[in-house]
């Protein structure tokens, strides 16, 4: 007798019947995507787990944000889509910057002879580069800007960019680039670049100091304030002067910080009252890139559409070896972008993201990371020869794109720590022993489903300076045994411990057990992995304690240097060993620079630092490689990191998506993507046939449960007082 | 009546102040303005200047509760607490730490929350009452005992299992509805079915059980016997006599919740990816966005107090014996 | 009047209950043991008995309205040749309210609080007659007029709580008579009512019985009621009918001792106690107790309900002052005020000349020894979690007498003996005692601190008549023995003569009349007193 | 071996002792006895109580912690004894090291091979990719085909042992209680089955992973069992912690009325008007920070987790405090109008004495009812909080953490169902028992409901 269930299932049945009736209208019942406008080829993707916070190229500094930004803005430089190792190509600029070296007096000189004081980068804007249509450019017949308001009331009716009836456009000017750089320097914007770039760009510091105490009312026209290191030569050409030599600067030019910002746009968004309706450059990017933003609802989705004024840009015709076979050159020479529209829907739960991908409602398994490590490892198994899809996946001929990010995750020792720190032989041995005990390969296999490569050096693959094979192994931790690196034995580790004065992990003098402390971010580590690490070190008798804390505490500990072993990760800004080796550059230590330095190990080695200084200003080449190798050896000997691995992410894409090659650094690859819509529709219909029988079952159940109730009631009515 | 309501509203003010005080203390013991700055600015190249900048920009560059170097009353007024909470009372929630206008976010996110919470609420109550009435009719029989046991069993299952199970079966295995998501265009109900269903089923145990006891309490009253003596049929007694009387206690329990429906359900929304206030709150907690947390707490409290007042009013409507004053 | 009614000659049997037996569903223990009687048209058959005698169960059984815990094991109820017990539930629903109707004890709770009086009466008609709409309403109003509800048109829309107790009971009656049943079962129809109202309601029932040729089963515990209304009486004791007779001969010479006892409980307003010597122990001078009425936004006090409005009286040593009045007349409030449990708004309270009004908790302590109290409801006036011993000891301890442990226990023994309960009861808990015993314990508790004045707040109203007599007797004895004075608060004049020297009649906060018991009972001046007196049932 | 007394351990034992004392005191009071008798005179009451008792037993055993001493390393002369930093409990010993048998990663219940393929070398030393055998399952078998038979035989022996053991345990009870009117046999039945189950689990878990293993290769059954302590403690301690506040304030408000009442009402209205989840989240973060800032207070990680746990209990207590306070206030208001309190006033009994002797004893039933009612609610809440990320410390086994971790596993092909199942079963059993039991208790103690029954 289960009336409650009865009623609940009754409710269920009702709901489902209503579904039955209505669902006959459009496609599969479970289609979660909003109806897309007909005739436009739409790329369906997701932002996960959180919407971008900042879309102002001067402020944003997160990969999920640049995913959106890089489709809209076009910095002067960019990367070749296909070629590996990563190759710089001009994007917004006509050509590579022409660099002239200057001496202290500002005269052009030959770099090899005199001491270089400055280097000037001259850039030329592409002739056909134009901005997307945007109300900021809209002018009335007299040529005066249409949307320039004096008080909040006037603009009240506009809540979205799409609300503005008129729009205009114009060519990209050299000054826009200059303006953008000035915005970086404007302390009011609080750009993360400011501190860093001020070290290089001439006059940036003074400029920002000057603006600090400028009274500002609404929009501040930065054109009125010159910056020494910036000069507009003409409509299309401008100069950036930086201190000394800094070859990596061209790489910086490939980041969204340097994309052009038209002053009128900045002015437009400073209209009174706009900020209260979230009408800011931070939410409505305006650029000259392949796409433009038509909708930005951080609660549900971001929609991009083809920028009609996008310059003539074509699919590359040559790529890395094997690309042709992979069909990555089929679209060679086609005009970009290849899709008209891109929808990024907010997806919080990885689980439903994955399900939707399997149901064909997302074109790819992820954008900023493939999610493979987190959930759908079961989609494939990492076999001896790379990735093999599970039967189910293979059946759906889903494509696989491995992507080794130019980044590195590591647990570092604090070299100032009394127990594990220090540079004496014992301490080195101790650290090496710990390194050996932590079986990185196994760890990656279990917790990253093998999507990661144990690091033998701080420099990841694809970056010059990375060495593969026998030459590349870390001889202190590995041996090269028949063609593969094999971790040294536990016995060896134990031996090292004995030499380090910790036989069986007990202090040789006091007999006190060796206990190491690992500072982790509370969210970043799971119970299971803690257990695993415990067991790993238990093998050499070392005890582990964890000190979990949230990001802020962890950061404090790092800044004050009171950690023992800390976890950290680094994603490359640009593909150059310098961007990794500086992680251990002495002056970068927070305790020394009294800043948020990156050298959290507080590693200090005069030799290393000297080499770094030399290497930093060298042009790429064999000589540089040699120095890099030398530095790497130093690090290996000192065993600065407990373990490290290169994050390897695996992206899946449905069969109707083409040109999926991942680019580790550049995010503006959306323009290359091609979609076969017909195939998509067909597959979706195929994969999403609903299962009906539960509805009938539910209905039956309801009846089955109601019946006894009715019977009992009738019996009750017939009852008499006789027995 | 009117006087009563006004008085209650006035009484709300000290409560809201207390609520604010509590949230502030809690939150700032947890993390200083600097921490907030850091967690907002991300983790690369965070310079002290940037932090100062952020604090100044977001108005966290003042002392928390007491401004020692100010004079007179400004000691209290020239503080973060005063600035922020006075604004609240004017329903100006200001901007989130990430720079968005909270008021407009709340306004937009309110509706999805309602879209889920309201049907769940109404259908839920409907189903529960029906079930409870059915069970009451067979009070004392095996039917009754079985049902009660089932209720308790249903109650004893964690909400999470209902959600996980529902998604797994209905959405994933049977492919009857989208597993998650929400968009205003097209058929919204498509996304509501599963959350509502889960919500209702999960609620039956506790709800029906509670209503049953209420109904039984009424069923034992004298006037029910009077009605029998008149010759009313069981059904008439149930619907004409017991139900209207049981409505009174039901109202107390239920009406309080109505305003809070706006706040949505944390779990349901985050599992089913519904962009409502519930998930808004969760995100705020996770990203430690104090501005949002503060505003949500404030709204929450107001709604709760509103609920209390509504309850009293609904009393007068349901129970002729009650007069407000 | 329907055709059916015409044929019914007076005295013809309308309902015949034969050998009715009701048992507890689970244990099978019999509550009603094979009783039989028949109701005749135009006559009132009174079923008398004390609480727990099974009289109410009998009535419910006749209607087949027993709760699940009880069930009918045998017997039959015959109405116009059909055995009600043989009918299906569905058919039974047609009988109820149309052939057999019922009135319940507490009208307030027996009426549906959220339905208007009119609607509830109308419902009955809807069930059994084709009447609808205007006609229906019209009929209800007519019924209201018949049962004497003032301006019925308006009362139709009233909710039960808006009606006075008497009117509520009248609505019940209207509801019962709506479909002109042949049989009316009235279960303690007047117990909850004040005496004056009681009388009116009973009269109404009697008239209706005559005018409509009803067969009435009147269930009551109050011999007075029986004497004044019934035609025939049956006494029920422990589930059995021990005596049946016409009212006249029953009161003339009852067969059973038990019946005799019941009759004797009726007051004899002939004998009075002589006034005791006049040495004022407690003097009240123009005492006022006011409760503020708050209104408006700021809850300002706009007015006062004058619960006690200027009462002056004096109680002498060893004297009993009976304070009589109906519920809400403020007599209990006055009692609490004397005990200093209620803030007094004006006047003086003097004990042996010392004013005690408004003095502090500690300052009051010495007087607490002298004034004690016995409450109405014995069950709620004892902490269920304390032994009787502790309960009695409490006062002694807090008022600091009989200090030593054994001294105290011996005292408790004595006291319990004195109130005719064995000393061994000291270790028992309240719920193990009957109402009468509890009230004795309460008396013992009061005596424990040997006070000079005991305020008895309706000490007997919760007790059955037989017990009541005993308790009153005990009180009287104690007075003779210890010379203690009583302020005896009661609503029921009938017990006054047995114990009161002086009587004060209270109405809405004022003492409308006071004097010696004799004066008041023989020559009442104030009309209200006269009304009260008239309502008291008496033997001769 | 060095005993470790965590705060929660101390508290739970304190609770047990005080409860024992409480009942010892109440056994004199006939009414309370009557009511308990009523609870236990029903079969359901016996059964549910036995189940709960079993859970509590496990929790108590699991709350006897100690640290193993490390054997001295050879070659090092050590006078001082050092201890392992892993804290073990008596319960761990009883499970026969179930928790120490780790696999590499997932494996299905009773499986002999891992759930995932690995690169292996076959006999010929060729690289092949296959499911590796488990380290701790079916080692004793010659070939996998024997598994079924083996399980069966081991089950039979285990059951026999179980029966023997339960006979030993129940026999004395029978001798003692065979005359009593209570349905002890029901309890004995449950006891027997629990014991048999226990023996079966322990004996089989030596040879198999009964509920498989999780991502990290840890035995799921063991985790579920460890969850018991967390659940039970959370359910009891949270209420225990809030009781003093709620009762004092509630009673004061109801008894003294006036401004005291106003203040108390203001307090709980304010507290209850804050969305609970936000309050809890904020407070949990707060404690987290405190713990992070004072790491040296805690010798071993366990203590840290434990401190966090206590904090959680405390917070849950505070947030659920207002409802009980409200109830008690109302009840006190009622009681202070009753005759016996009035009488006490008339005897000039002091406030404290009235509160102590008349008011408190008569609100105890409310406390009791809330205690049992809240229990299950709290156990359920833990899961939800863990999902939101403000639950118990991940290093502390709890059903919430298990569910949270296992959420995504359902979507794997083939589905990994056992982690969820484990958590579900143990949680459900406890909460169901608690709910049913609390119903009985409420029916017995709540005057309203008992009134109902007397009427019908």
Image (cartoon, coloured by chain):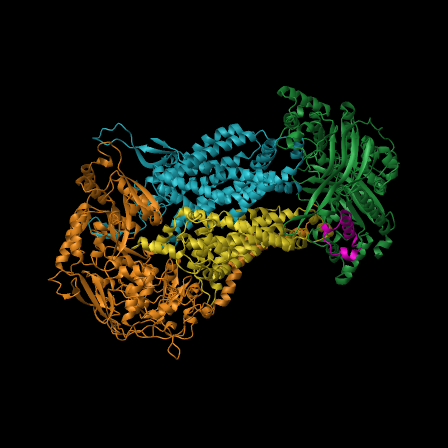
Chain colours: A orange, B yellow, C green, D cyan
Closest to the observer: C200 or C204? C200
The residue depicted at 43 percent of the width and 32 percent of the height is D165
Q: Is residue D144 visible?
A: no
Closest to the observer: D246 or C131? D246
**Residue A9 vertical position relative to residue C380 in the rendered view, above or below:** below
Q: Is residue B62 left or right of residue C506?
A: left
The residue depicted at 62 percent of the width and 54 percent of the height is B313
**Residue A144 vertical position relative to residue A636 in the rendered view, above or below:** below
What quarter of the picture does the C terminus of chain D occupy?
Answer: top right
| Whole-percent x, y for residue C401 in the image | 65, 23
| Whole-percent x, y for residue A391 in the image | 32, 59
Q: Which residues are magenta?
A: C151-179
> Quick check: is C270 in the magenta stretch?
no
What quarter of the picture does the N terminus of chain D occupy?
Answer: top left
Find the residue positioned furthest to the bottom.
A141
**Residue A596 vertical position relative to residue A84 in the rendered view, above or below:** above
């Amino acid at each position: 007798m289960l009336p409650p269930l009865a009623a609940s299932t009754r409710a269920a049945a009702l709901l489902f019947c209503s579904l039955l009736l209505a669902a006959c209208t459009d496609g599969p019942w479970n289609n979660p995507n909003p109806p897309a406008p007909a005739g436009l080829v739409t790329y369906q993707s997701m932002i996960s787990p959180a919407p971008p916070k900042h879309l102002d190229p001067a402020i944003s500094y997160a990969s999920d944000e640049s995913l959106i930004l890089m489709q809209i803005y076009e910095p002067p430089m960019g990367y070749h889509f296909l070629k590996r190792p990563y190759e710089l190509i001009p994007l917004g600029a006509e050509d590579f910057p022409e660099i002239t070296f200057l001496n202290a007096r500002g005269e052009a000189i030959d770099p090899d002879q005199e001491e270089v004081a400055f280097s000037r980068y001259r850039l030329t804007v592409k002739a056909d580069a134009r901005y997307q249509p945007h109300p900021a450019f809209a002018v009335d017949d007299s040529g005066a800007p249409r949307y320039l308001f004096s008080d909040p009331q006037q603009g009240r009716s506009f809540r979205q960019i799409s609300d503005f009836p008129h729009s205009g456009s114009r060519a990209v000017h050299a000054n826009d680039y200059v303006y953008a750089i000035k915005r970086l320097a404007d302390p009011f914007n609080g750009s993360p670049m400011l501190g860093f770039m001020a070290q290089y760009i001439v006059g940036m510091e003074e400029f920002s100091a000057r603006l600090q105490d400028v009274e500002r009312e609404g929009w501040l026209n930065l054109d009125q304030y010159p910056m020494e290191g910036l000069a507009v030569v003409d409509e299309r050409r401008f100069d950036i002067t930086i201190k000394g030599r800094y070859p990596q600067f061209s790489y910086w030019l490939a980041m969204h910080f340097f994309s052009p910002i038209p002053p009128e746009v900045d002015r437009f968004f400073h209209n009174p009252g706009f900020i209260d309706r979230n009408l800011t450059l931070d939410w409505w990017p305006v650029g000259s890139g392949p796409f433009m933003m038509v909708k930005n609802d951080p609660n549900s989705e971001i929609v991009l559409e083809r920028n009609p004024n996008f310059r003539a840009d074509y699919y590359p015709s040559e790529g890395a070896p094997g690309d042709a076979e992979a069909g990555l050159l089929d679209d060679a020479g086609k005009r970009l972008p290849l899709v008209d529209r891109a929808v990024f829907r907010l997806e919080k739960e990885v689980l439903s993201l994955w399900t939707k991908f399997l149901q064909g409602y997302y074109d790819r398994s992820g954008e900023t990371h493939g999610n493979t490590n987190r959930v759908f490892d079961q989609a494939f198994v990492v076999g001896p020869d790379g990735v093999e899809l599970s039967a189910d996946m293979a059946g759906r001929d889903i494509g696989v794109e491995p992507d080794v990010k130019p980044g590195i995750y590591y647990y570092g020792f604090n070299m100032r720590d009394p127990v594990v720190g220090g540079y004496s032989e014992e301490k080195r041995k101790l650290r090496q022993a710990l390194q050996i005990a932590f079986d990185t390969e196994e760890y990656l296999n279990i917790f990253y489903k093998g999507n990661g490569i144990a690091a033998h050096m701080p420099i990841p693959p694809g970056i010059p300076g990375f060495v593969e094979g026998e030459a590349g192994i870390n001889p202190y931790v590995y041996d090269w045994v028949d063609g593969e690196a094999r971790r040294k034995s536990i016995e060896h580790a134990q031996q090292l411990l004995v030499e380090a004065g910790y036989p069986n992990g007990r202090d040789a003098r006091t007999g006190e057990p060796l206990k190491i402390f690992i500072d982790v971010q509370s969210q970043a580590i799971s119970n299971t992995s803690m257990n695993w690490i415990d067991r790993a070190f238990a093998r050499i008798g070392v005890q582990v304690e964890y000190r979990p804390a949230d990001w802020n505490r962890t950061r404090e500990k790092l800044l004050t240097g009171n950690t023992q072993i800390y976890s950290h990760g680094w994603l490359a800004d640009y593909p150059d060993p310098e961007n990794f080796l500086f992680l251990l550059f002495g002056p970068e230590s927070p305790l020394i620079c009294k800043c948020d330095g990156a050298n959290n190990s507080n590693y200090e080695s005069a030799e290393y630092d000297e080499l770094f200084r030399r290497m930093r200003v060298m042009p790429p080449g064999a000589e540089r490689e040699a120095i890099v190798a030398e530095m790497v050896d130093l690090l290996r000997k000192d065993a600065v990191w407990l373990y490290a691995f290169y994050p390897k992410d695996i992206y899946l894409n449905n069969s109707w998506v083409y040109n999926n090659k991942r680019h580790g650094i550049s995010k503006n690859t959306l323009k290359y993507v091609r979609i076969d819509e017909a195939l998509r529709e067909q597959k979706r219909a195929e994969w999403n046939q609903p299962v009906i029988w539960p509805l009938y079952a539910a209905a039956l159940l309801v009846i089955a449960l109601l019946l006894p109730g009715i019977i009992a009631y009738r019996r009750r009515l017939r009852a008499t007082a006789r027995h | 009546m009117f006087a009563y309501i006004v008085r209650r509203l006035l009484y709300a003010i000290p409560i809201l102040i207390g609520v604010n005080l509590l949230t502030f203390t809690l939150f700032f013991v947890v993390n200083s303005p600097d921490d907030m700055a850091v967690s907002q600015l991300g983790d690369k190249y965070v310079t002290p200047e940037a932090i100062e900048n952020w604090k100044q920009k977001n108005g966290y560059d003042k002392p928390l509760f007491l401004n020692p170097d100010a004079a007179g009353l400004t000691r209290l007024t020239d503080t973060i607490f005063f600035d922020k909470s006075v604004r609240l009372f004017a329903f100006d929630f200001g901007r989130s730490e990430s720079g968005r206008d909270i008021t407009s976010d709340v306004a937009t996110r309110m509706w999805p929350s309602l879209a889920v919470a309201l049907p769940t609420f109404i259908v839920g109550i409907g189903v529960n009452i029906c079930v409870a009435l059915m069970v009451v009719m067979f009070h004392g029989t095996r039917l009754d005992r079985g049902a009660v046991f089932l209720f308790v069993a249903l109650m004893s299952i964690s909400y999470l299992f209902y959600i996980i199970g529902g998604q797994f079966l209905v959405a994933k295995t049977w492919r009857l509805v989208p597993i998650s998501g929400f968009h205003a265009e097209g058929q919204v109900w498509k996304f509501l079915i599963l959350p509502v269903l889960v919500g209702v089923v999960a609620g039956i145990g506790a709800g029906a059980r509670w209503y049953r006891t209420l109904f039984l309490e009424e069923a034992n009253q004298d006037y029910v016997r009077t009605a029998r003596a008149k010759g009313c049929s069981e059904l008439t007694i149930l619907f004409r006599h017991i139900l209207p009387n049981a409505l009174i206690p039901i109202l107390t329990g239920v009406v309080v919740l109505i305003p809070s429906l706006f706040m949505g359900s944390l779990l349901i929304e985050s599992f089913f990816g519904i962009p409502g206030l519930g998930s808004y709150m969760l995100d705020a907690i996770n990203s430690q966005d104090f501005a949002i947390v503060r505003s949500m707490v404030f709204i929450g409290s107001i709604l709760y107090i509103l609920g209390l007042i509504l309850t009293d009013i609904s009393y007068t409507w349901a129970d002729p014996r009650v007069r407000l004053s | 009047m329907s055709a059916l009614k015409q044929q019914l000659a007076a005295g013809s049997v309308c309902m015949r209950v034969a050998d009715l037996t009701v048992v507890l569903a689970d244990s099978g223990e019999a509550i009603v043991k094979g009783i039989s009687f028949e109701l005749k048209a135009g006559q009132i058959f009174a079923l008398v008995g004390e609480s727990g005698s099974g009289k109410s169960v009998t009535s419910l059984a006749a209607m087949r309205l027993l709760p699940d815990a009880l069930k009918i094991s045998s017997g039959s109820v015959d109405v116009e040749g059909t055995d009600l017990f043989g009918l299906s539930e569905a058919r039974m629903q047609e009988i109820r309210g149309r052939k057999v109707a019922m009135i319940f004890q507490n009208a307030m709770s027996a009426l549906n609080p959220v339905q208007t009086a009119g609607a509830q009466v109308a419902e009955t008609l809807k069930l059994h007659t084709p009447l609808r709409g205007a006609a229906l309403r019209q009929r209800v109003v007519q019924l209201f007029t018949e049962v004497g509800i003032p301006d019925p048109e308006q009362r139709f829309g009233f909710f039960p709580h808006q009606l006075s107790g008497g009117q509520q009971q009248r609505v019940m009656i209207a509801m019962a008579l709506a479909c002109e049943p042949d049989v009316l079962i009235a279960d303690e129809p007047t117990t909850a009512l004040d005496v004056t109202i009681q009388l009116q309601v009973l009269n109404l029932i009697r008239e209706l019985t005559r005018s409509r040729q009803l067969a009435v089963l009147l269930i009551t515990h109050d011999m007075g009621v029986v004497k004044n209304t019934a035609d025939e009486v049956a006494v029920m004791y422990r589930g059995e009918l021990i005596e049946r007779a016409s009212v006249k001969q029953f009161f003339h010479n009852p067969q059973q001792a038990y019946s005799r006892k019941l009759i004797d409980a009726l007051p004899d307003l002939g004998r009075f106690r002589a006034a005791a010597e006049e040495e004022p122990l407690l003097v009240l001078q123009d005492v006022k107790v006011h409760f503020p009425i708050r209104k408006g936004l700021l809850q300002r006090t706009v007015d006062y309900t004058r619960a006690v409005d200027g009462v002056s009286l004096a109680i002498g040593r060893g004297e009993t002052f009976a304070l009589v009045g109906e519920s809400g007349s403020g007599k209990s409030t006055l009692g609490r005020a004397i005990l200093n449990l209620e803030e007094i708004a004006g006047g003086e309270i003097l004990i042996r000349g010392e004013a005690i009004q408004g003095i502090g908790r500690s300052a009051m302590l010495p007087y607490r020894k002298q004034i004690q109290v016995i409450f109405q409801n014995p069950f709620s006036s004892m902490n269920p979690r304390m032994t009787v011993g502790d309960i009695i000891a409490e006062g002694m301890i807090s008022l600091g007498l009989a200090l030593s442990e054994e001294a105290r226990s011996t005292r408790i023994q004595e006291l319990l003996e004195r109130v005719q309960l064995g000393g061994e009861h000291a270790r028992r808990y309240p719920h193990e005692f009957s109402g009468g015993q509890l009230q004795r314990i309460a008396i013992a508790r009061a005596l424990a601190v040997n006070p000079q004045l005991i305020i008895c707040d309706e000490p007997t109203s919760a007790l059955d008549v037989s017990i009541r007599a005993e308790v009153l007797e005990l009180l009287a004895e104690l007075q003779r023995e210890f010379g203690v004075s009583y302020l005896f608060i009661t609503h029921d004049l009938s017990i006054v003569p047995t114990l009161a020297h002086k009587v004060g009649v209270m109405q809405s906060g004022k003492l409308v009349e006071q004097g010696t018991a004799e004066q008041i009972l023989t020559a009442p001046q104030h009309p209200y007193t006269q009304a009260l007196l008239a309502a008291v049932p008496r033997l001769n | 071996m060095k005993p470790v007394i965590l705060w929660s351990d101390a508290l739970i034992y304190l609770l047990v002792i005080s409860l024992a004392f409480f009942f010892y005191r109440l056994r004199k009071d006939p009414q309370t006895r009557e009511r308990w008798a009523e609870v236990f005179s029903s079969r359901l009451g016996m059964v549910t109580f036995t189940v709960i008792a079993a859970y509590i037993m496990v929790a108590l055993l699991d709350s006897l912690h100690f640290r193993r001493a490390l054997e001295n390393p050879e070659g090092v002369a050590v006078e001082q004894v050092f201890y392992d930093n892993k804290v073990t409990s008596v319960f761990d010993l009883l499970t026969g090291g179930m928790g120490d048998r780790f696999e590499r990663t997932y494996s299905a219940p009773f499986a002999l091979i891992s759930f995932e393929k690995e690169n292996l070398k076959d006999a010929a030393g060729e690289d092949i990719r296959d499911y590796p055998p488990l380290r701790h399952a079916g080692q004793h078998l010659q070939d996998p085909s024997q598994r079924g038979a083996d399980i069966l035989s081991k089950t039979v022996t285990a059951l026999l042992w179980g029966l023997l053991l339960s006979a030993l345990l129940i026999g004395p009870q029978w001798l003692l209680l065979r005359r009593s009117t209570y349905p002890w046999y029901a309890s004995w039945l449950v006891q027997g089955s629990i014991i048999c189950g226990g023996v079966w689990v322990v004996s089989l878990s030596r040879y198999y992973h009964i509920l498989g293993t999780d991502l990290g290769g840890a035995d799921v059954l063991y985790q579920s069992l460890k969850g018991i302590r967390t659940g039970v403690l959370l359910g009891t301690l949270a209420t225990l912690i809030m009781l003093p506040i709620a009762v004092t304030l509630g009673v004061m408000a109801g008894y003294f009325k006036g401004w005291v009442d106003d203040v108390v009402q203001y307090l709980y209205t304010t507290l209850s008007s804050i969305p609970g989840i936000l309050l809890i989240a904020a407070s949990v973060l707060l404690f987290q920070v405190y713990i992070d800032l004072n790491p040296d207070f805690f010798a071993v990680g366990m203590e840290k987790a434990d401190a966090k746990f206590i904090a959680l209990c405390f917070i849950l207590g505070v947030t659920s405090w207002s409802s009980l306070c409200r109830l008690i206030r109302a009840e006190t208001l009622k009681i202070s109008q009753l005759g016996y309190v009035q009488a006490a006033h008339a005897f000039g009994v002091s406030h404290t004495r009235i509160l102590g002797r008349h008011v408190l004893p008569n609100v105890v039933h409310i406390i009791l009812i809330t205690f049992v009612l809240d229990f299950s609610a709290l156990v359920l809440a833990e899961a939800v909080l863990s999902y939101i990320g403000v639950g118990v410390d991940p290093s502390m086994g709890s059903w919430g953490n298990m569910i949270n971790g296992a959420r995504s596993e359902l979507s794997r092909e083939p589905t990994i169902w056992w982690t969820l199942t484990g958590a579900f079963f143990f949680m459900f059993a406890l909460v169901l028992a608690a709910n049913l039991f609390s119903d009985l208790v409420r029916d017995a103690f709540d005057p309203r409901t008992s009134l109902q029954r007397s009427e019908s």
